[in-house]
Amino acid sequence: MLLRGAIAVAISTASGTHLPVYAAEPAFATIDVQQGRALKEQGVLLLDVREPAEYEEVHAPGSTLVPLSELPSRLQELRSHLLKPVAVICRSGRRSARAAEIMARAGFTNVYNVQGGMNAWEAANLPVIKGVR
């Protein structure tokens, strides 16, 4: 698991000595859309955290929709990927970063945020499935 934000604090003991305590937040890696596509082609779960209407408009082939608003209550559905790579995508990369953070905090150890999201995916002319706009 990647770690970020290591914080060092000291705890005073009865004898007056200070013991260091280190805490760290779980983190995730950020990848570009080409790396996201490569992971998807290797069979990695591409988790789309946009809302259903956004997903229907355009999405990456083979992606799985779990809206960010539902993610905390649906993490159990994704437990089979706890130790496997998961690439998370949204429209621009903001919601997917939040989702990746939620997943990392829940114990997912190999989470990737796809920077730029579907906006960048489409701009790179990567394969998409388009629905009704």
Image: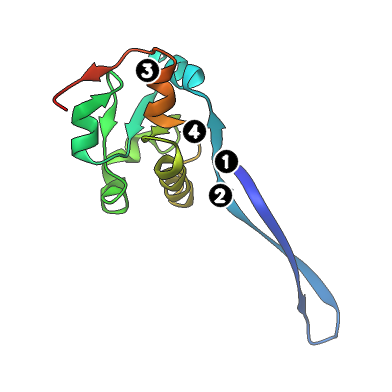
Q: Secondary structure at mark 4?
A: strand
Q: Earlier in the sequence, mark 3 or mark 2?
A: 2
- Residue at figure coordinates x 32%, y 39% from the top left: 49
Distance from disc 4 to disc 2, alpha carbons, whole Å, reads: 12 Å
Horizontal and vertical percent for residue 86? Answer: 42, 31
Horizontal and vertical percent for residue 69? Answer: 28, 51
What is the crowding at mark 2: few (fewer than 14 residues within 10 Å), some, or many (at least 20)?
many
Query: Label 2 near label 1: C-beta < 8 Å?
Result: yes
Quadrant of the rendering where the C terminus is positioned:
top left
Q: Which residue is mark 2?
A: 26
Instruction: Give the amino acid type for the residue marked by disc 4 in the picture.
Output: Tyr
Q: Which mark is residue 43?
A: 3
Horizontal and vertical percent for residue 82? Answer: 41, 38
Q: Earlier in the sequence, mark 4 or mark 1?
A: 1
| Up/down of 122 relative to 30, above or below | above
Q: Earlier in the sequence, mark 4 or mark 2?
A: 2
Q: Which residue is mark 1?
A: 1
What is the crowding at mark 1: few (fewer than 14 residues within 10 Å), some, or many (at least 20)?
some
- Residue at figure coordinates x 50%, y 39% from the top left: 109
Instruction: Give the amino acid type for the residue marked by disc 3 in the picture.
Output: Gly
In the displayed orientation, state which residue is furthest to the left: 132
Instruction: Give the amino acid type for the residue marked by disc 2 in the picture.
Output: Pro
Q: Earlier in the sequence, mark 3 or mark 1?
A: 1
Q: Which residue is mark 4?
A: 112
- Residue at figure coordinates x 32%, y 47% from the top left: 68
Distance from disc 1 to disc 2, alpha carbons, whole Å, reads: 7 Å
Q: Nearer the viewer, residue 62 or 118?
A: 118
Q: Nearer the viewer, residue 37 or 22?
A: 37
Distance from disc 3 to disc 4, alpha carbons, whole Å, reads: 14 Å
- Residue at figure coordinates x 26%, y 40% from the top left: 66
Instruction: Give the amino acid type for the residue marked by disc 1 in the picture.
Output: Met
